[in-house]
Amino acid sequence: MTRHHRSIASIAIFVGAFVASGPAAATAALPAPAANAATPLPSAPPLESGFGTLPTGPLDSTRSATLQALLDDFVTHGAPDVMAAVITPDGIWSGAAGVSGPDGRPVTPDAEFAIASITKTFMATLIMRLVEQGRMDLDAPLASYLGDVQADTNGATIRQALAMRAGLADTAAGVNDLTAADPLHIWTPEEIIATFDPPIAAAGAMSQHSNPTWKLLGMAAEHVTGKSLAAAMRAELLDPVGADRVLLQGPEAVTPKPWALPMPGHMGDLDASLLGQGDALPFLASASYSAGAAGMASDAPSLAKWAWHLFAGDIINAGSLGVISDSRLSDGMGLYQIFDYPGFTTYGYDGGTRGYGSKLIASMDRPAVVVVLVNDLDTDPSVVAGQLLDAATK
């Protein structure tokens, strides 16, 4: 289903004023960074896992009861809600506790959720799919894959962009106000790029969290595939493994219900009236602006199943997994090694936006996937994720 595209006059005026007073003024004050100043890292070793075929049956009742009790305890100690899924070779479990949304409805395991920066794991996987197909080169300039899109890529390569070493700045101040100004607006690449701040360092010289970099990678994937990013993800990453409730939100698909929504007091400065506008989470303009950096949604079981397929080698090969999880990089390249869980070798990613916090972890030595979703950015899901992992693999 395609949503109708509202008039962009008000957004165009707002973006123009924002750019005139911010990025454009700052550009002249900065020297042009030198491209590819740092020595590139050698190739990463393959990431091998013991993941086999996705199991189809449930976990046993004893472990299932233990896992549910952990969620109940998490809510008792202050979380407004929690949705989780666990997969081991022995079976699949999902559960939920607490209430969500302005009406305080009991949350369910299949509630759709804005997974925010876990989108980067999908984005990195898509890039590696295209590399495996010979359609992209990790060490080619990002700019060479943008077609007619005009953006300052700072001379960065695809590999540097994936590692957030492109030298590009993070999201500029004031963007939340821009998206809230017209919650049904669908942001174009040109409008998104117009909000970017200028580069802050030479490409390759430093690690800098940068959502704009991932948005440019998404635009590159669109150019290479000749499809929208949502369609490319569906064709390359989602439909082949039956992930029909995972999606990049935007004009091409309605985000399926039920939705997990934050309650008052757990959504920061997010206006509750915006929630779900445009059939997206937290709302359409925010999701479309977030794009390849943070625009995806999923429920917990669907995300866990997709991650199992990823680590089982059903989507990209072990060599590609090694690239995007390179443990020599603090944030990896869409996956990072997580050292929070002694006794486990784990990889994964976090997501967070106003009213939404998420955690994806995969254990290599004791094969398991754990997903935890909480409608509160300030409630850390890491501890309960580790408890679930430990209880499920005993």
Image (cartoon, rainbow, N blue to C red):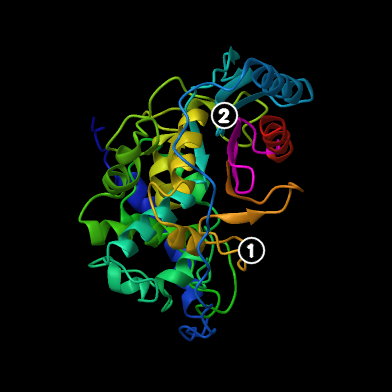
Is 5 colored magenta in this rendering?
no
Question: Residue 268 occupies which quadrant of the picture?
Answer: top right
Q: Secondary structure at mark 1?
A: loop
Name above or below for residue 372 compared with residue 207.
Answer: above
Quarter of the image for the N terminus: give it. Answer: top left
- Which of pointers 2 and 1 lies earlier in the amino acid sequence? 2
* Residue 214 x, y percent position in the rendering: 44, 58
What numbered label is drawn on residue 387? Answer: none
In the image shown, does 378 or 86 lie closer to the viewer?
86
Judged left or right of residue 168, residue 77 is right
Is 369 colored magenta in this rendering?
yes
What numbered label is drawn on residue 330? Answer: 1
Q: Residues within 10 Å of mark 2 (few under 14, many from 20)?
A: some
Residue 290 seen by the camera: yes
Question: Residue 80 occupies which quadrant of the picture?
Answer: top right
Judged left or right of residue 391, residue 369 is left
Name above or below for residue 313 compared with residue 87.
Answer: below
Instruction: Name the residue located 40 percent from the left edge and 40 percent from the top edge.
Output: 285
Identify which amino acid the numbered label 1 is placed on. Answer: Ser
Instruction: Give, as a single range, the part of the protein colored magenta.
Output: 357-381
Quarter of the image for the C terminus: give it. Answer: top right
In the image shown, does 81 or 364 lie closer to the viewer?
364
Separation of residues labelled 2 and 1 (CA atoms): 32 Å
* Residue 213 x, y percent position in the rendering: 45, 63
Label 2 sits on residue: 90
* Residue 243 x, y percent position in the rendering: 37, 34
Identify which amino acid the numbered label 2 is placed on. Answer: Asp
Instruction: Name the residue located 51 percent from the left edge and 56 percent from the top edge.
Output: 334
Question: Residue 157 occupies which quadrant of the picture?
Answer: bottom left
Q: Secondary structure at mark 2?
A: loop
* Residue 303 x, y percent position in the rendering: 48, 36
Judged left or right of residue 279, residue 116 is right
